[in-house]
Amino acid sequence: MNNDDRVVQRTRRRFLVETAALAGAAGMGLALDAAPAPATPASMHTAIRKVVGEAPLNKGKLKIDVPALIENGNAVPLTVSCESPMTESDHVKAIHVFTEKNPQPNVIGAQLGPRAGRASVSTRIRLADTQKIVALAQMSDGSFWSDEVEVVVTLAACLEGT
Amino acid sequence: MIAAAALFLIALASAGTAGSAEIPLAERKSDYEFMGRETRAMQDDDTANPATLWVLDGETLWQRKDGSAGKSCGDCHGDARTSMKGVATRYPAFDAARGRPVNLEERINICRAEKQQATPLPFESKELLALAAYVGRQSRGMPIEITEDARIKPFLQAGRDMFTERQGQLNLSCAQCHDDNWGQKLAGAPIPQGHPTGYPLYRLEWQTLGSLQRRLRNCLFGIRAVSYPYGAPELVNLELYLMWRARGMPLETPAVRP
Amino acid sequence: MARALINAPAKAKRGEVIEIKTLISHVMETGFRPDNAGKPIPRDIITDFICKYNGEEIFRAELFPAIAANPFLTFFTVATESGTLNFEWTGDNGFSATESVNITVE
């Protein structure tokens, strides 16, 4: 299988940005066989609203742990943890993660519950560019808490080819 | 950012050829030390290191009977944890029958052809990488042991020449970056010394496990020089020189790199 | 079946919060990468992961293309009783993989 070629990636980004402009601010999809426009802050907010509805996002309780300077956007370690006693009556039901500038805003949606013991999920994600990551936690009482971080993604110095 | 990198490279390209000096042995650092904390943590934890998946596959392949001889690696070599201990630290190694050094992947294929009567595994195939990772893993922590003897001397010199000679459109030598300017930044990323202490390794850029030859081919592409096909003697000579340059440094196979 | 690696304690005390680490081999093709002709390589990802403890679901995650290749996922659970932890990954193109480990809780 071919691997990410930075020249191709940059060309693709330019293509996506240009076609996104053509497709309009709503970030609507293009022809079926073309790649969708990259996520914009607007599409990230739409994806977030799909999860939380009209509920407000409270700041606090949730913490995103990610390197501030990322050596390679292909595999970025990410931990999202939320303060909570994790009891039947007071626990984290779900943790969701979103990005601002990836081609698609959703990253992961994890369902927890009182059996989790600790509300903390770790994984490795892809980041297409320097951007904002937003995480939110849905609590058993229906409230939503969020955190966001800005990260810088560096590209490999030399083009690799294959 | 790319413009800055280009200027740096142009500066290197036009600088005089006044002797690239080898890094003094005591000043050598593994490329591990140039990585960020989180990438190092990925390598240090076998349960998080993606390369472990290949090591596990290698363990399975070690026991799989193959070829018309119907033998597995284990049938001759027994438990790899004992029989393969130290082996990867000595490769590339001189092969008397072929009169030249061969790397570990080639050695595995020679065994397959001669002892198992099995077809060689393609270079960079999942299976060959898994076996190389499994064998390499058995030497983790042990010092690299390429000793200069009369037989490998000409090949070592050929590898050294390739490392120190300017080549490609940018007229750059490996030594100019990795001997003379290690530690400095190129387009935001630190230039490592370039020791192959952890191959085959999981490169985040590749999103998969890959061999030293893959990395070398990519380096050559990066400096816009003529590359070589997998298995080319030029690449084996360069591997030999690089492992010799890293002699005494502990093997980290299978490593993680950005 | 894709190679999977589970790291969970073999033994735990009742009520102890334990960490479970999972790693599975999968290319996680995003669907956004172009091939040499410029056409996007079709998406091929793991979309769902479920962990069950003695048959009861204790953790579930929906994965998207932004999850890195060879997905690594860790989470916690309370060690309630001895038994089996089952793991199931499903995804595009009928992808399915399962793994299980035993746990002794005293």
Image (tube, grey):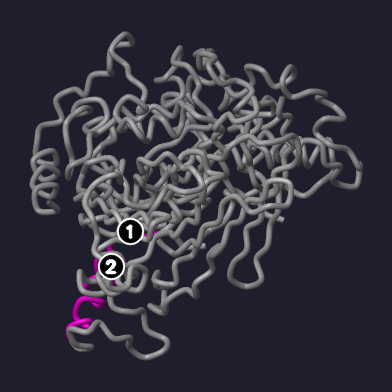
Helix, strand or loop status at disc 2: loop
Tell me if I can see residue A11 in this picture. yes
Chain label for disc 2 = A
Magenta span dominant secondary structure: helix
Name the spot of residue A95 as percent of width and height, x first: 40, 54
Disc 1 or 2, which lies upstream in sequence? 2
Q: Name the residue at 57% across, 56% down.
A: C26
The residue drawn where x is 82% and y is 30% is B74
Query: Residue sitting at 56 percent across and 33 percent down?
Result: C18
Q: Is residue B123 above or below residue C10?
A: below
The verdict on residue A14 being magenta is yes
Q: Nearer the viewer, residue C76 or B244?
A: C76
In this view, the residue farthest toward the front is A89
**Label 1 is placed on what type of residue?**
Ser
Mark 1 in CB contact with mark 2 (< 8 angstroms)? yes
Q: Which residues are magenta?
A: A4-21
State which chain disc 1 sits on. Answer: A
Mark 1 highlights which residue?
A143
Q: Quadrant of residue A103?
A: bottom left
Disc sitting over residue B145 in the figure: none
Q: Which residue is mark 2?
A: A55
Q: Is C50 colored magenta in this rendering? A: no
Q: Position of residue B130 (x, y in %)?
A: 64, 41
Direction from residue C98 to residue C36 in the image, left or right = left
Question: In screen coordinates, is C85 left or right of B226?
Answer: right
